[in-house]
Image (spheres, rainbow, N blue to C red):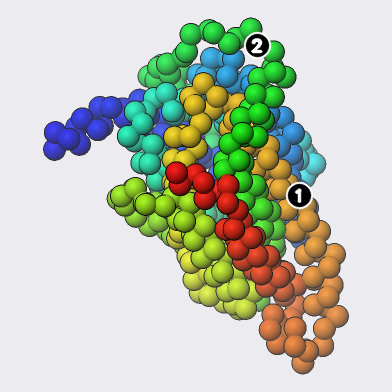
Amino acid sequence: MNKYKETIQEMKSYLLLWSTQSFSGLGSAMTSYALVIWSYTQKGSALMTALLMVSSYAPYVLFSIFAGALSDKWNKKAVMLVCDTAAALTTVVMLLLMRAGVLQIWHLYLINGINGLMNTVQQPAAEVAVTRLLPRKYYQRVGSMRYLSSSLNSILTPILATAVLGISGMGAVVVFDLVTFVTAFVTLAFAIRIPEEEETEHKEKILTAAKEGLGYLNKERGILGLIMFLAAVNLVASLYEAAFPAMVLSREGGNEKALGMVNVVIGIATLMGSITASFLKTPKSRVRVICNSLLFSMSTENFLLAFGRTPFVWCVGGFLGWIAIPLMNTNLDAIMRLRVPDSMQGRVYAVRNSLQFFTIPLGYFMGGLLVDRVFEPIMAWQPKESILSVMFGTGKGSGAAFFFFVIAFLGIAVCLYFRKNKHIWELEK
């Protein structure tokens, strides 16, 4: 009992930050979930819906390198508070447009772009803040706790968003989002002190600082290899994310309820994986855990989504695809925090974000475009007795199922290719 009390005392500030930011994340996730359903019901297009995520990630990719340099120069708490406030204001604007009956999908693209820019600046500041709030011995636990909150939000988001939408409408979802923002803002502003380093590098030019982040990764080829591995995985994952709502909402037996059900199961899987990761001892080979977890994920979910015709099979696919991801992320997070010096983390994480996440908007755009313009038309031309129709069904959504079959092999190929990268394995030393 004394040991647990000591742990809680040492992690007190982080636990406050983690719990309130997770609560705020739930509100934001509910809004995003409701808007995905709204946009698809308005247009019926996988591409138009996928562009919501493209607009969020584009500024994140374009400006992350410079944002990291700024993050290292600026006060971490101030950066987080300002970015959260700006994001909340865009949510208020969206609510006003909706209440006036003039909300258009292009408004959401613009709002998501602003939110993406705010997240670009905030994310490296938050990463450094976590490092400064915690002793090194808790770094492994941080990764599992993050996935714990993420999985809980994944479980609660479709349930709460669907319930609130059905009872009180979109306005109530947004109001809940704003309440969670205020809770997180007040806690961070008045209850958490984030240590700041002495101003030794604040006169350094932003471009110089950004180049230092790139230079560090050029020397640390193992870290760079991991980042490029994750970039390739993110490409496959974003192709999947672009096609997933379109398939589940449009296939026979699929609807908003089925989409929510699969998302809940994915949340349960990540919750179980997070709890498991938090109790496991430090593995002998973090790299092996990362490689094996991603290979297992890529080898299961996409095939079940491709061949499944019922929500039950889709749920099984979602469970298998996500159960090992928290274990992967926990070890990836530990490697980054242990290998990258505290004074460089803002810059290195920002460069990592640009390199690791530039494939996400590309994948969303390509996924939506390929489903709408290639795979759905191919399946629409197929006679009912054709091999493709037998394998993937007929009607709208069958093209997305065919697409999942293709990206399953792409995901496996990515994992096997990067598994042979010698620089990644050098991180084991």
Q: Which residue is mark 1?
A: 362
User: Residue, x 61% and y 46% (percent of image)?
Assistant: 225
Q: Amino acid at mark 2?
A: Glu
Is residue 205 shown to the viewer in this render?
A: yes
Residue 352: x %, y % from top left: 62, 37
Location of residue 69 by image quarter: top right
* Image disc number at residue 247: none
User: Residue, x 41% and y 34% (percent of image)?
Assistant: 18
Q: Amino acid at mark 1?
A: Leu
The image shows residue 340, relative to residue 311, as above or below, that is above
User: Residue, x 44% and y 50% (percent of image)?
Assistant: 286
Nearest to the observer: residue 260 or residue 377:
377
* Tag 1 secondary structure: helix
Q: Earlier in the sequence, mark 1 or mark 2?
A: 2
* Tag 2 secondary structure: loop
Left or right, residue 271 beside residue 60? left
Nearest to the observer: residue 308 or residue 39:
308
Label 1 Cα crowd, 10 Å radius (few <14 / some 14-19 / many 20+): some
User: Residue, x 75% and y 88% (percent of image)?
Assistant: 387
Quadrant in which the N terminus appears:
top left
Q: Residue placed farthest to the bottom in the image?
A: 385
Residue 424: x %, y % from top left: 55, 48
> Which of the two discs, 1 and 2, sits closer to the camera?
2
The image shows residue 381, relative to residue 429, as above or below, that is below
Residue 406: x %, y % from top left: 71, 70
Residue 197: x %, y % from top left: 47, 13
Q: CA distance from mark 1 to mark 2?
A: 33 Å
Nearest to the observer: residue 155 or residue 1:
1
Is residue 187 shown to the viewer in this render?
A: no
Q: How many marks?
A: 2
Q: Which residue is mark 2?
A: 204
Quadrant in which the C terminus appears:
top left
